[in-house]
Image (cartoon, grey):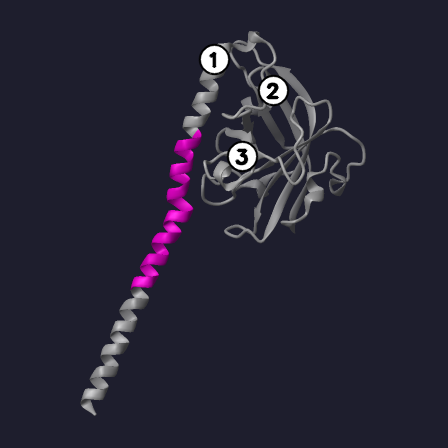
Amino acid sequence: MARARNRIAGAVSVFGELLITAGVLMGLFVVYSLWWTNVLADREAGRQGDRVRDSWAAEGPAAGPGALDTGEGIGFLHVPAMGGGEVLVRKGTTPEILNDGVAGYYTDPLASALPKDPQGNFTLAAHRDGHGAKFHNIHKLRDGDAIVFETRDTWFVYKVYKTLPETSKYNTEVLRPVPKESGRTAPGRYITLTTCTPVYTSDYRYIVWGELERTEKVDADRTPPEELRAS
């Protein structure tokens, strides 16, 4: 009887140790997913962003309108209400692109317009948690907040006019050239930010829509618009 109790006690002890080990491994995985991937992604995004800015500096704003659709990056997103710094924007929304700590513009299922286009919807995605988490604070955006996109020669200043806190990940209507789900019915120059929600999941999508208010030419000092100087 005593031997049986000892065997049971030993089995319980081993099982307990396995649970502790599993808990430690899970904790390490969470640290990796929510912290270390941010560190790695921010480093890579910084390197990519530096290359883009170096190429701009070599060409100079006087070189004429810049080609937006490049492999390195088309420009930088600035959203003061979300905090943080600039976000490099590249072509595509695959994990291979977004995991580098950047935002990407959609090529499918509906192709994004670009800011320089006379009309359309500039549609972007970025991670909300891990891998740079560039849109982590998207829920802080309110109507009237500024979304500024910077290219080599132009500042595009958008203003938020509508948010959709939760929608299906399969809802492509939010990416339409005229995003009627946002209340707009006529062609214009829109911007749409998309990311996962709730936080730490990818069950649904959080959507923010903005509309172009004005553009400003980049000067020699790259003086930002007043919306960024005040932030």
Percent x, y of residue 189:
71, 27
Residue at (42, 28) in percent of width and height: 46
Which residue is at 54% across, 29% downward?
89
Magenta region, residue range: 21-45
Tell me the crowding category of disc 3: few under 14, some 14 to 19, or many 20 or more residues within 10 angstroms, Cα based: many
Residue located 57% across and 20% down the image: 151
User: At x 27% / y 68%, what residue is drawn?
Assistant: 17
Left or right, 83 with respect to 21, comes to right
Check residue 153 in the rendering and tell me which mark sits there, or answer none.
none
* Residue type marked 3: Ala
**Mark number displayed over residue 57:** 1
Q: Is 220 located above or below residue 97 in the figure? A: above
Front residue (pair 63, 217): 63
Q: Position of residue 32 (x, y in %)?
A: 37, 48
Q: Is residue 197 left or right of residue 36?
A: right
Quarter of the image where the C terminus is located: top right
Tag 2 residue: 155
Amino acid identity at mark 1? Ala
Q: Is residue 43 magenta?
A: yes
Would you name the residue on which mark 3 appears?
A: 103
Report the predominant secondary structure element of the magenta stretch. helix
